[in-house]
Image (cartoon, rainbow, N blue to C red):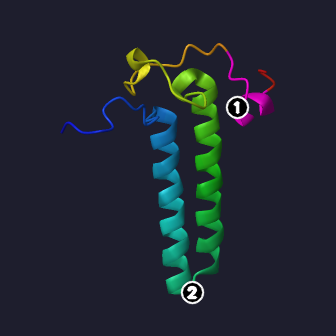
Amino acid sequence: MSGVHDDVDLGHTVAGWTGCVIGLTGSAVIGVAMCAGWRPGLWLGAAVVLVGGLVTWALHLAGWGKPSGPRPAEQWDWRIKDPMTGHGGCLACRLAGRV
């Protein structure tokens, strides 16, 4: 499908997709727990969402994320690891002490 946005890097990365799936799963657990009145399920869902954030951070630091802003066209494929030269404005890198 060719369109107006063919030259835009949408930032699809392994870290982004993995974190999104884990976060959505945790949110679904919270929703089911609320409907069922199952209080431990609320905590379980919240824990899954938290784990999703940590997994995303770990994958980003392992090179499967991307820095803020556009990347060169040759790095758009989601299977290409980030060169990890440090991301100046990246909160995850600052928290890890990389910048």
Tell me the tag on residue 66.
none
Numbered-mark total: 2
Q: Is residue 46 left or right of residue 17?
A: right
Q: Amino acid at mark 1?
A: Cys
What is the C-alpha distance between the residues marked 2 and 1?
39 Å
Q: Is residue 87 in the magenta section?
A: yes
Tell me the quarter of the picture where residue 10 sits.
top left
| Label 2 environment density (alpha carbons within 10 Å; few <14, some 14–19, many ≥20) | few
Q: Is residue 56 in the magenta section?
A: no
Task: State the residue at coordinates (48%, 67%).
Answer: 28
Q: Which residue is mark 1?
A: 90
Please, is residue 87 above or below residue 46 in the view? Answer: above
Task: State the residue at coordinates (63%, 32%).
Answer: 58
Tell me the tag on residue 37.
2
Q: Amino acid at mark 2?
A: Gly
| Label 1 environment density (alpha carbons within 10 Å; few <14, some 14–19, many ≥20) | some
Q: Quadrant of the N terminus?
A: top left
- Range of residues picked out in magenta: 86-96
